[in-house]
Image (spheres, rainbow, N blue to C red):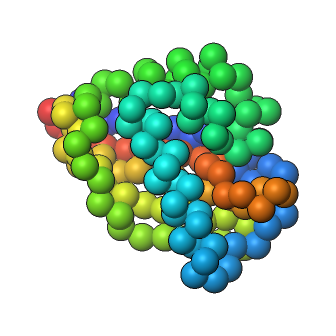
């Protein structure tokens, strides 16, 4: 794979979000939600990942469409091996986490996961991007 293009769960990352992400607790809670969601992706449980996604994602993309997109992009990477946290970018209504991940067939995958705090106070994933320059 020469280049795996970035893709997003939703075009609009902040649909329905009025939360303001500030403070260490918000960052920790958003990171925990993001990492829990990524475990579903790693297990190829794309339906569960869609169910746990932000409301805007579920409104903008059907579960079937999400499953097809996630499968087409994620499965070619091969089995998930490890992930290393890199950074967090805190914005007024979202937090984006960056990771470097190792997969069976791709060893330098950059993943970004954006979480928003929804009206019910729960952090949920509203965006996911994946990019790799691995030449395997």
**Residue 62, percent from left and from top:** 71, 22
Report the number of numbered marks. 0
104 versus 39 height, above or below: above
Q: Name which residue lies at 49% across and 49% down.
A: 36
Foreground of the two, 77 or 118: 118
Visible residue check, residue 21 = yes
- Quadrant of residue 106 in the image? top left
40 versus 85 height, above or below: above
Image check: 103 left or right of 28?
left
**Residue 112, percent from left and from top:** 47, 53
Foreground of the two, 92 or 48: 48
| In the image, farthest residue toward the left | 136
| In the image, farthest residue toward the bottom | 23
Image check: 47 left or right of 83?
right
113 versus 64 height, above or below: below
**Residue 27, percent from left and from top:** 57, 72
**Residue 124, percent from left and from top:** 65, 51
Visible residue check, residue 5 = no
Q: Name which residue lies at 36% across and 67% down.
A: 86
Image check: 3 left or right of 117?
left
Q: Name which residue lies at 46% across and 45% down.
A: 38
Image quadrant containing the N terminus: top left
Q: Name which residue lies at 84% across and 57% down.
A: 119
Image quadrant containing the C terminus: top left
């Amino acid at each position: 794979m020469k280049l795996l293009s970035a893709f997003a769960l939703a075009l609009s990352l902040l649909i329905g979000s009025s939360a303001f992400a500030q403070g260490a607790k918000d960052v920790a809670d958003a990171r925990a939600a993001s990492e829990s969601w990524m475990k579903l992706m790693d297990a190829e449980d794309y339906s569960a990942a869609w169910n746990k996604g932000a409301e805007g994602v579920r409104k903008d993309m059907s579960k079937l469409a999400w499953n097809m997109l996630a499968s087409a992009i994620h499965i070619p990477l091969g089995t998930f091996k490890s992930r290393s946290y890199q950074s967090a970018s805190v914005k007024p209504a979202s937090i984006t986490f960056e990771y470097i991940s190792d997969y069976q067939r791709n060893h330098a995958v950059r993943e970004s996961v954006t979480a928003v705090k929804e009206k019910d106070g729960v952090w949920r994933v509203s965006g996911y991007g994946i990019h790799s320059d691995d030449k395997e």
